[in-house]
């Protein structure tokens, strides 16, 4: 199964209550569609760099809009010239947490938005 960035970004994010977390194989498959993203410390992560604070904050606002629209919110670390984004899904595995399709949908939407800047 091939996962495509554009197709992934178009999928609807849906509640994950009670769903199983992705396996390592599923995570690796989906990461192939997301340039620069990696799986570490139980999260899907990427650092985005910018030339100034204004661009950094403009991007943070785009990420916030994506998070609000999907009701799926990443951990953000914001610095002058970069933003670290980390996703995981708290409500999979009966509240134990893990990685779900929503993490990859949101990451794909962020990738698409970033490409437009």
Image (tube, grey):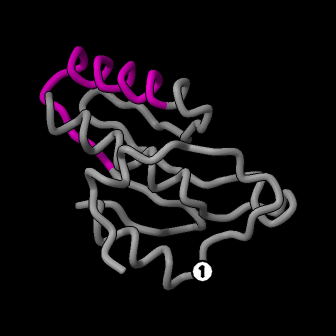
What secondary structure predominates along the stretch shown in magenta? helix
Q: Quadrant of the N terminus?
A: bottom left
Residue 58 position, x and y percent, is 29, 17
Figure quadrant of residue 14: top right
Of 81 and 34, the residue lying toward us: 34
Judged from this view, the residue extending furthest toward the right is 94
- Residue 59 in the magenta stretch? The answer is yes
- Report the residue at 41% width, 31% height from top: 78
Decide: is 105 above or below 18.
above
- Report the residue at 80% width, 52% height from top: 17
Residue 3 position, x and y percent, is 33, 68
User: What range of the chain is rendered magenta?
Assistant: 47-66
- Residue 14 in the magenta stretch? The answer is no
- Report the residue at 57% width, 67% height from top: 41
Q: Is residue 89 left or right of residue 3?
A: right
Q: Is residue 77 left or right of residue 18?
A: left
Residue 27 position, x and y percent, is 48, 74
Can you identify the residue that label 1 sits on?
23
Q: Quadrant of the C terminus?
A: top left
């Amino acid at each position: 199964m091939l996962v495509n960035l554009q197709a992934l970004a178009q999928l609807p994010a849906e509640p994950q209550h009670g769903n199983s977390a992705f396996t390592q194989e599923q995570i690796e498959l989906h990461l192939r569609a997301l340039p620069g993203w990696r799986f570490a410390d139980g999260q899907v992560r990427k650092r985005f760099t910018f030339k100034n604070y204004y661009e950094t904050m403009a991007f943070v606002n785009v990420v916030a809009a994506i998070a609000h629209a999907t009701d799926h919110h990443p951990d953000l670390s914001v610095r002058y010239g970069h933003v670290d984004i980390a996703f995981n899904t708290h409500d999979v595995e009966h509240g134990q947490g893990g990685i779900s399709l929503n993490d990859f949908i949101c990451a794909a939407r962020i990738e698409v938005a970033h490409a437009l800047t």
